[in-house]
Amino acid sequence: MAGGIVHAVDPHTPDSMQQLMPSAGAGGSLPPLDPDPSQAFLRNLERFGVRDCVIYHRAPSVEVAARWRGERVRLLYIDGLHTYDAVRDDYNAWKPFLADEHVVLFDDYLWEAVGRAVDDLRPQAASRFFYVRGGHAIFSTTRLATCIIGLP
């Protein structure tokens, strides 16, 4: 996709950056790394020279999907809140906008709630292929040579 545009969707608030730690139970969380995570994100885009290729939507995924008027989505990378409902909500919000040929990656598939949600979504996915690589679950409409996308 040389020369393409990427839409990055994330509220990047301190609260949105905290995730429940699987081993810590309901009371455990990771502290925010930056008081304004959006600034760290923008600095990284600049650092890697890709700022001009990224349209940043600083909002929750389901809100951006509700007002999406862009092109059909060929690659969807879901790395949201690590709860069963949030994973399902993110996928279902974007599903109507997926291109006929598409790939959907779910980060942190090895987290119990994420894995359960992804497994429950599989029957309704339009994809023919399912992969698990490097902690990611992947739905794809075409066979992938996963070594090409950089996953073990």
Image: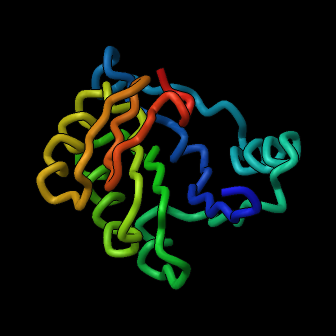
Q: Would residue 60 be found to the left or right of residue 25 on screen?
A: right
Residue 57 spot, x, y in % from top left: 63, 66
Q: Residue furthest top?
A: 23
Q: Position of residue 137 (x, y in %)?
A: 34, 36
Q: Is residue 69 above or below residue 60?
A: below
Q: Position of residue 21 (x, y in %)?
A: 38, 23
Image quarter for residue 35?
top right
Residue 63 lies in quadrant:
bottom left
Query: In the image, is residue 48 above or below residue 142?
Result: above
Q: Is residue 117 left or right of residue 98?
A: left
Q: Is residue 87 above or below residue 29?
A: below
The residue sitting at 83% across, 62% down in the picture is 52
- Quarter of the figure with the N terminus: bottom right
Q: Residue at x 32, y 67 (%)?
A: 95
Q: Is residue 83 left or right of residue 68?
A: left
Q: Position of residue 55 (x, y in %)?
A: 70, 66
What count of labels does the image hold? Answer: 0
Q: Residue at x 35, y 41 (%)?
A: 138
Q: How is colour applied across the structure in the image? A: rainbow
- Relative placement, left or right, of 83 versus 15 is left
Residue 11: name its quadrant. bottom right
Q: Residue at x 39, y 68 (%)?
A: 98
